Image: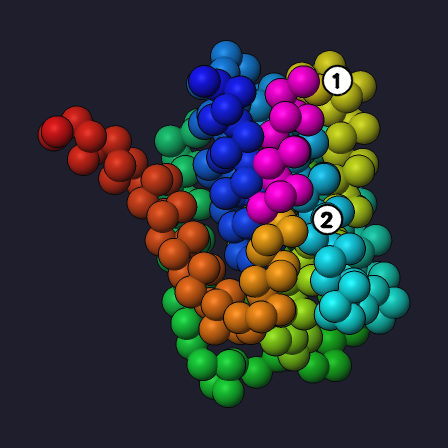
């Protein structure tokens, strides 16, 4: 049942991550349920992320939605930040962290729902400032990963005038690039269980494939719907609402 659950949750997470973010909120509890300690689950989850973002990036590229060359500098900064973040992974108070992450998700939801005509990208930011911003974003991605899709989307729309389809395309490519290096770090630390990671990845690939095709057909409207639902559910999970409801049933 655990293997089947990993595969099915992998499909759902691959779909959600490719259009929005927060899929790790689904996959990490299942990996922990399978008996993996939290640090090992955090590392093993990256295998699915790698295959999922690789699939999504290739599909966005095929549909001519992914352009890499103008953003090489922020990709490199994200990679460096992620390497540092993965090297500095430590045990933190998960309850406090979950609450802070939940607040972050709600803020991102509000920003996402504001009409794009009222949100102006900050143009003419020096490249070194953009690199510093994405160095910090990359650090977070290497350190935790959960919620990085939301953070990247809002950051990309802050520094560039993206629509949500193109923002998702460059988002998944950035995550794909830095995940290669975080996996190397976690592998040398002996924290990856490849059998679970590859099983999860098989589902992630299917979810990512479906997501990109849906994004191309449904456009920004579909992405906003998925993004809003994903953030709300992730926030409720992090604030312990589901556990509270379950305790009363």
Depth check: give the residue in front, 150 or 121. 150
The quadrant holding residue 88 is: top right
Residue most extreme to the left: 248
x, y percentage for residue 56? 69, 53
SS of the residue at dot 1?
loop
Name the residue at 45% across, 81% down. Answer: 115
User: Nearer the viewer's eye, disc 1 or disc 2?
Assistant: 2
* Quarter containing the N terminus: top left
Number of residues whose C-alpha sits closer than 10 Å to that of mark 2, classed few (under 14), some (14–19) or many (20 or more): many
* Position in image of residue 234 (x %, y %): 40, 46
Magenta residues span 195-207
- The answer to whether residue 49 is left or right of residue 126 is left
| Residue 85 seen by the camera | no
Which residue has dot 1 on it?
A: 189
Q: Is residue 12 visible?
A: yes
The tag on residue 55 is 2
Corner quadrant of residue 59: bottom right
The mark nearer the N terminus, 1 or 2, is 2
Secondary element at image label 2: helix
Residue 44, above or below 78: above
Residue at (50, 34) in percent of width and height? 8
State whether residue 14 is above or below residue 245: below
């Amino acid at each position: 049942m655990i293997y089947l659950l990993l595969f099915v949750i992998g499909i759902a997470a691959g779909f959600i991550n490719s259009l929005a973010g927060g899929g790790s909120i689904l996959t990490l509890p299942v990996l922990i349920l399978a008996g993996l300690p939290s640090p090992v689950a955090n590392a093993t989850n990256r295998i699915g992320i790698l295959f999922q973002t690789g699939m999504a990036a290739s599909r966005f590229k095929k549909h001519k939605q992914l352009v890499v060359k103008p953003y090489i500098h922020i990709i490199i900064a994200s990679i460096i930040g992620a390497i540092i973040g993965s090297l500095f992974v430590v045990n933190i108070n998960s309850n406090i962290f979950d609450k802070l992450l939940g607040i972050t998700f709600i803020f991102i939801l509000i920003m996402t729902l504001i009409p794009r005509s009222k949100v102006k990208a900050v143009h003419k930011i020096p490249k070194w400032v953009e690199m510093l911003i994405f160095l910090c974003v990359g650090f977070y991605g290497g350190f935790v990963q959960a919620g990085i899709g939301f953070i990247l989307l809002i950051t990309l729309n802050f520094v560039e005038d993206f629509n949500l389809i193109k923002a998702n395309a460059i988002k998944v490519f950035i995550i794909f690039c830095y995940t290669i290096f975080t996996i190397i770090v976690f592998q040398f630390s002996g924290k990856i269980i490849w059998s679970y990671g590859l099983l999860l990845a098989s589902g992630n690939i299917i979810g990512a494939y479906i997501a990109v095709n849906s994004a191309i057909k449904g456009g920004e409207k579909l992405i906003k719907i998925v993004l809003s639902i994903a953030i709300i559910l992730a926030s409720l999970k992090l604030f312990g609402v589901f556990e509270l409801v379950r305790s009363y049933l």
